[in-house]
Each structure stands twice: as structure tokens, then as C-alpha cells.
Image: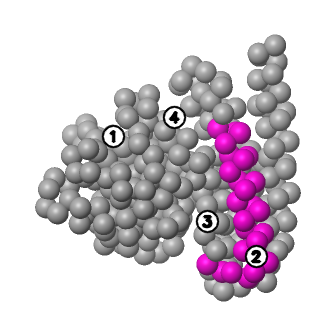
């Protein structure tokens, strides 16, 4: 699993390990290439946008390492819905594409399609289509946090602690990224701004921070067109929204955990 976002790494690991998967994690494309050895892995989940080396470059290097040996499937995992991204992934040597935010069922199905390709021949169900590029988010726009995905994961694991654990990781990770986003906005550094806002969009979507994901998506779209006139406002909006998410989690997750442990 090559993914630079701590929350996304934890979420994916929690989904895959109960399926019997052993998950090795890399925080950058460079780490992924360094860890990769032919015959050691059955599948690679590759984030497209990472520091040091992006997922496309890392995949090209993995294909060179294989050098004609048995080919390991590489599935792109990305929050980008820009036209042409899928083609770029395939051209880089990737085999498939999973768009963020993804449902837990969609993630499991995609992994099983590649690990056990003979068992899956059914068309995507309604839950799958929600996670395809360009699809509208399933949760209502006015919702601050939709915890249904994490609660589903907790029910499957038989422990509510997973929700609290992932909530802490999300808050810590995104708080750091909002600070980094503010620095990029002040410097009017388009490249840095786009990298951070893309990461915030992906993590927020997967976590269920609905309004935060929408704010990030709108700002990313504007910045991609070279318009940085509203980045300062977007940073403020995301900071306020993060506190709104924190307040909901304090009430619905952390307070509940305190009562249960008392």
C-alpha cells in the first residue's frame, strides 16, 4: 500500500487485514519502489499523488524492476477525477483504477478482483457506482460528518475503538495539512497548494467529512485553473470546518468512548 496520507493508510489497512491480507505500507513512491521485490507481493495499491515520487513514476520503476518476470497488478488509488487520469495510469503500467472516496465494499471488491479474479464476474452494484470518478458524493451536502463508513468497519471488526482510532488519526493529519495549506496559500505556490488541497479532499471524502471534502474540491478546481484569488478564504473555511468536524466527533465518538470505558 503506497499512500502518503496517514488516515487513508489506516483505513485501508483496517479493511484489508480482516480479509487475510498482510499489508506493507509506504508513505511515498520512493519508499514503494525501495520496498518492492518481484515475487514478494500479490498486489500493489498505489496513490497517484505522493511526495518525492508520484505513483505513476513509481509504477514505471516497478515495471522496470520486474524486467519480464511475473507481473504484479498495480491498482491506482486517487481522488483525481480529471479527464485523462485513467489513461495516464494505464500508460504508466497500472492495471486498474479505484477512485476516492471509495466505499468499503468497493475497496474489498477491487482487491478481490485482482487477488481472486475468477470469483467475480458480477456488474458493479449501486454502492460501487458511487465511488466512480465524477459521481456525486452520496452523503447530503449539509452533513458535517457521515460516520456510516467507519461505523460499518467497527461493526465488522466487532470493536467500536476503530472509529475513535481513525478519528484521532484524521484530525491530527488534516490539522497539519491545513497549516501547510495556509503556508502554500500565503506564498501563492500553486503546485504546493494543489498537492495539499488534493490530499485534504481525498482524506475528507474517505473519512466522511462531507462539507470539508466539498470545500477542498471546489478550491482545488479553482486553483487548477490558475486562480489563486480565493485560496486564503478556502484555508479559513477549511480551518473552521475542521473545528466543526472535531466538535461532532467530541460529541458522537470521544464522549461515547469515555462513557463506555467508565
x then y, percent, for residue 243: 84, 50
What's the CA distance linking mark 1 and mark 2? 41 Å
What's the CA distance linking mark 2 and mark 3? 14 Å
Q: Which mark, residue 185?
A: 2
Of marks 4 and 3, which one's residue comes earlier in the chain?
4
Magenta-drawn segment: 166-191
**Where the C terminus falls, by quadrant?**
top right
157 to 66, vertically: above or below? above
Using the image as rendered, state which of residue 105 and residue 174 is in the foreground: 174
Task: Kindly report which numbered mark, 3 or 1, lies closer to the viewer in this rendering.
Answer: 3
Circle 1 SS class: helix
What's the CA distance linking mark 1 and mark 4? 16 Å
Q: Which residue is mark 1?
A: 112
Q: Which residue is mark 3?
A: 198
Of marks 1 and 4, which one's residue comes earlier in the chain?
4
Of marks 1 and 2, which one's residue comes earlier in the chain?
1
189 sits to left or right of 237: left
Of marks 4 and 2, which one's residue comes earlier in the chain?
4
184 sits to left or right of 47: right
Of marks 3 and 1, which one's residue comes earlier in the chain?
1
> Going 82% across and 18% down the picture, which residue do you hit?
259
Amino acid at each position: 500500500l503506497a499512500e502518503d496520507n496517514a488516515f487513508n493508510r489506516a483505513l485501508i489497512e483496517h479493511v484489508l487485514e480482516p480479509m487475510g491480507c498482510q499489508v506493507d505500507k509506504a508513505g511515498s513512491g520512493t519508499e514503494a519502489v525501495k520496498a518492492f521485490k518481484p515475487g514478494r507481493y500479490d498486489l500493489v495499491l498505489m496513490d497517484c499523488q505522493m511526495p518525492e515520487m508520484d505513483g505513476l513514476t513509481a509504477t514505471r520503476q516497478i515495471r522496470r524492476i520486474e524486467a519480464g518476470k511475473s507481473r504484479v497488478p498495480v491498482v491506482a488509488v486517487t481522488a483525481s477525477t480529471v479527464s485523462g487520469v485513467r489513461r495516464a495510469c494505464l500508460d504508466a503500467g497500472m492495471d486498474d483504477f479505484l477512485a476516492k472516496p471509495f466505499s468499503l465494499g468497493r475497496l474489498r471488491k477491487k482487491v478481490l478482483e485482482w487477488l481472486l479474479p475468477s470469483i467475480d464476474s458480477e456488474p458493479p452494484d449501486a454502492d460501487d457506482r458511487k465511488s466512480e470518478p465524477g459521481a456525486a458524493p452520496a452523503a447530503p451536502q449539509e452533513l458535517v460528518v457521515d460516520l456510516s463508513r467507519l461505523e460499518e468497519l467497527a461493526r465488522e471488526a466487532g470493536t467500536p475503538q476503530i472509529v475513535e482510532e481513525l478519528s484521532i488519526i484524521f484530525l491530527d493529519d488534516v490539522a497539519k495539512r491545513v497549516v501547510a495549506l495556509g503556508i502554500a496559500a500565503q506564498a501563492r505556490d500553486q503546485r504546493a497548494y494543489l498537492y495539499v488541497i488534493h490530499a485534504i479532499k481525498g482524506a475528507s471524502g474517505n473519512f466522511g467529512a462531507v462539507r470539508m471534502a466539498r470545500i477542498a474540491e471546489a478550491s482545488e478546481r479553482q486553483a487548477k485553473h490558475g486562480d489563486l484569488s480565493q485560496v486564503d478564504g478556502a484555508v479559513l473555511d477549511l480551518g473552521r470546518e475542521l473545528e466543526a468536524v472535531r466538535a461532532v466527533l467530541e460529541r458522537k465518538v470521544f464522549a461515547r468512548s469515555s462513557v463506555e470505558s467508565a
